[in-house]
Amino acid sequence: MRVGCCAYSFRDRLNSGAMTLEQFLDLAAGMGLDGVELTAYYFQQTDRDSLFHLKRECFRRGLHIAGTAVGSNFCQADAARRHEHVVMTKQWIDHSVVLGAPCIRVFAGPVPPGHTEEQAVAWAVACLQECAEYGAQRGVVVALENHGGITARAEQVLRLVREVDRPWFGINLDFGNFRADPYREFAMVAPHTVTTHAKTHWRGPSGEEPVDYARALQVMNAVGYQGYLNIEYESKPDPLTAVPAFAAELKAAIQQLSA
């Protein structure tokens, strides 16, 4: 397994202009990480030359672009709005090709007020199928995150896997986003996982609980997972110090697993 970092981990600095994507790459390289996930929110420009520039800067620092990520919502009741998000996702699949990113993280979305989960699932499935089929044409895997809404529980995620049923579709398992019985749910979705987000904590009934990565990685190792653990830092301590410490923790857990 490899350790990477999501640009989202430094969202406050990236949003305020206190940090550029190039400076984020410097931090990732300084931590000895293998790669980065480049979140769409922080790109000031997406023309071909700008994307090629960032691709070159990653290469110069010895970093893979493990993936891109968009804030899609395929559960919107308005068909035109759903279509807009499909178009946006396809655009970022194209950007992923230019960047050399093998996958794109997407969200399904929540059930909109006044509608049922059955309706939301049907809308999301159709959109995800369209995006996955486009990804197949461009060589980019579409990775759905367990991110609340109709993906809050492993059972819901597995339903979407079954109904989307496309070879270029998989799961971005976020280790911090299951709320009830996370390790059981990790095991349920692990066989369909193509990439992951590593948070320091998950939110249980009694508050935040640290994720036991020795246990979580045993689950992933059992299904032969060899992909990325992309740090998605959301806790309160300063990420400039907390993310390197967490990266070291993940590297130690990987080493312990292979010992």
Image (cartoon, helix red, strand yellow):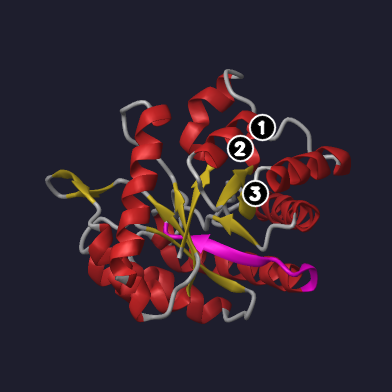
Q: Name the residue under label 1.
A: 22
Quarter the C terminus occupies:
bottom left
Q: Where residue 186 sits: x, y (%)?
A: 32, 68
Viewer-closest of 192 and 147: 192
Q: Which of marks 3 and 2 is nearer the N terminus?
A: 2
Looking at the image, is mark 3 or mark 1 earlier in the sequence? 1
**Which residues lie in the magenta part?**
137-146
Disc 3 from disc 1: Cα separation: 13 Å
What residue sits right under mark 3 in the picture?
A: 62
The answer to if 177 sits in the magenta stretch is no
Amino acid residing under circle 2: Leu
The Cα–Cα distance between marks 3 and 2, rounded to whole angstroms, is 10 Å
Asked which secondary structure carries label 2, the reply is: helix
- The three-letter code of the residue at mark 3 reads Gly
Quarter holding residue 87: bottom right
Q: What amino acid type is highlighted by mark number 1?
A: Glu
Where residue 187 appears, x then y in whole percent?
A: 31, 74
Q: In this view, does 50 lie to the left or right of 182?
A: right
Where is 147 relative to 124, above or below? above
Q: Is residue 44 left or right of residue 199?
A: right
Q: In this view, does 158 lie above or below 249?
A: below
Q: Nearer the viewer, mark 3 or mark 1?
A: 3
Q: Which residue is drawn at 64% across and 54% down?
A: 64
Rounded to the nearest angstrom, the CA distance separating label 1 from label 2 is: 5 Å
Badge 3 density bin: few <14, some 14–19, many ≥20, Cα 10 Å: some
Residue 216: % across, % down: 29, 65
The image quarter containing residue 218 is bottom left
Label 2 Cα neighbours within 10 Å, binned few <14 / some 14-19 / many ≥20: many
Q: Residue 161 carries which label?
A: none
| Residue toward you, 123 or 36 | 36
Label 2 sits on residue:
25
